Image: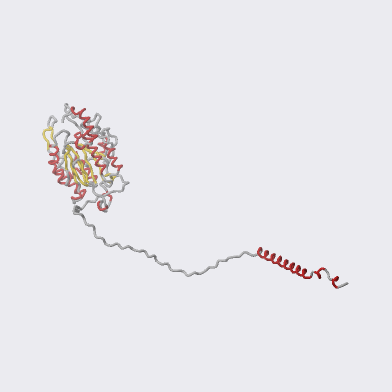
């Protein structure tokens, strides 16, 4: 056989076989490489991070630089020429805590007052009570509620007539008193007492702060007094025995009173020992308006007192009766002794400084339709020493219609047409 026949398949395709073998080897290597990478990726461990503490330099805090505004001194404003400034020395009003309903004699009796109302922005209220004017922050009203303020003319039988027309005077006085109390600032202390002859009924035993509730109390207290309609004389008539018992145990409240009286009362009479001290030579003791003023000074210690009356009666008035029971002689009133008695009382209560004493301001009511000459004489001659001694003011009501509002005037005219001809003025 020749050499050509001896050569096999690979001999004949030596180059192609080598290429195939090389290709196979590379394919195996690639496959192995790919497999190796895939396994490596799958089995690769997760990376772990560990926090390491790093020391950093600390910086010191700097203080904030706040800009400061410097106020320049400005020139004081100049007052206009029309403004007048008075250097006034004012008295100190004293006040109490709002939850306290009443304080005997005001806050001055609760310890050290510690300064004046006006020094902290309050001003002393100025009051006008039927023409009598005064300033004060502790005020007491002593008001006549007796027959002279509501009675008419003679009934022809030796008695006096009482009609809705004549009672309009008492209603007007009550209404104006309520109006004045309504205007008082809430830091004001006040109280009211009603009197006639031997009776004196206080609204409360202690001064009241002028809150809305206490202002309403005045209206409630006076609301039933001397109604226009009804068969009665005046509010103090027909009083029960409980009133006399209460006089001996002041302050005792009496609230079961006739329908025409005050809703309640604290009856007051100057104790015997004090009457002997301040009015030893007055046979009748303190009575009428004088008892009301004594109650105000001794029990309330106000800086302002207003008295409304129809006449002057004090404890120095005495009468002697003849065999027939009629008066044969009468010792006149003694206003100077009364003024001295009240001054002595104030000296003990307020001290020697007369600037601290109360003003005792007086209003005299002239009977409706009558000449006011007599009322002016009572004010000037009889109340004159009291008004002068206590540096007070006085006035006369010469026509009650001047103080009526439109509604009261219409009612007055109505009753005048019905009852005016039944009384003589």
Residue 306's spot in the image, x, y percent? 20, 42
Between 241 and 346, the residue placed more toward the observer is 346
Between 144 and 258, the residue placed more toward the observer is 144
Image position of 276 with respect to 45: above or below: above
Quadrant location, the C terminus: top left
Residue 353's spot in the image, x, y percent? 19, 51
Residue 407 figure quarter: top left
Residue 279 figure quarter: top left
Quadrant location, the N terminus: bottom right
Residue 308's spot in the image, x, y percent? 19, 39
Between 68 and 206, the residue placed more toward the observer is 68
- Report whether 321 appears left or right of 303: left
Residue farthest top in this picture: 157
- Report whether 15 appears left or right of 281: right
Q: Is residue 29 visible?
A: yes
Between 211 and 26, the residue placed more toward the observer is 26
Image position of 59 with respect to 172: above or below: below
How many labels were placed on the picture? 0
């Amino acid at each position: 056989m020749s050499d050509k026949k001896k050569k096999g398949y690979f001999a004949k395709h030596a180059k192609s076989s080598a290429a195939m073998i090389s290709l196979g080897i590379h394919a195996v290597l690639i496959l192995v490489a790919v497999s190796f990478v895939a396994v490596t990726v799958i089995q690769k461990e997760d990376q772990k991070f560990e926090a390491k503490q790093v020391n950093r330099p600390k910086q010191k805090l700097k203080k904030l630089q706040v800009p400061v505004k410097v106020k320049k001194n400005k020139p004081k404003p100049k007052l206009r020429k029309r403004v007048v400034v008075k250097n006034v020395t004012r008295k100190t009003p004293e006040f109490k805590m709002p939850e306290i309903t009443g304080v005997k004699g005001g806050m001055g009796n609760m310890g050290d007052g510690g300064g004046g109302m006006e020094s902290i922005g309050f001003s002393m209220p100025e009051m006008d009570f039927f023409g009598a004017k005064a300033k004060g922050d502790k005020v007491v009203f002593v008001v006549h509620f007796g027959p002279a303020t509501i009675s008419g003319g003679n009934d022809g039988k030796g008695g006096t007539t009482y009609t809705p027309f004549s009672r309009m005077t008492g209603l007007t006085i009550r209404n104006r008193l309520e109006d004045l109390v309504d205007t008082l600032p809430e830091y004001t202390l006040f109280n009211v007492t009603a009197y006639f002859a031997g009776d004196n009924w206080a609204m409360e035993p202690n001064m009241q702060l002028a809150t809305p509730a206490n202002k309403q109390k005045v209206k409630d207290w006076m609301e039933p007094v001397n109604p226009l309609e009804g068969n009665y004389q005046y509010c103090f008539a027909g009083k029960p025995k409980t009133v006399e018992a209460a006089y001996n145990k002041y302050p005792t409240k009496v609230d079961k009173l006739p329908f025409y009286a005050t809703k309640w009362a604290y009856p007051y009479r100057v104790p015997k020992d004090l009457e002997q001290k301040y009015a030893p030579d007055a046979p009748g003791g303190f009575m009428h308006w004088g008892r009301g003023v004594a109650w105000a000074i001794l029990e309330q210690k106000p800086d302002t007192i207003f008295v409304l009356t129809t006449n002057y009666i004090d404890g120095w008035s005495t009468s002697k009766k003849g065999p027939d029971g009629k008066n044969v002689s009468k010792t006149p009133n003694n206003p100077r002794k009364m003024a001295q008695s009240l001054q002595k009382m104030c000296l003990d209560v307020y001290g020697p400084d007369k600037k601290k004493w109360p003003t005792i301001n007086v209003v005299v009511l002239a009977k409706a339709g009558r000449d006011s000459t007599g009322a002016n004489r009572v004010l000037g001659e009889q109340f004159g020493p009291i008004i002068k001694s206590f540096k007070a003011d006085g006035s006369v009501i010469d026509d009650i219609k001047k103080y009526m509002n439109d509604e009261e005037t219409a009612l007055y005219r109505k009753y005048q047409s019905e009852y005016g001809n039944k009384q003589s003025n």
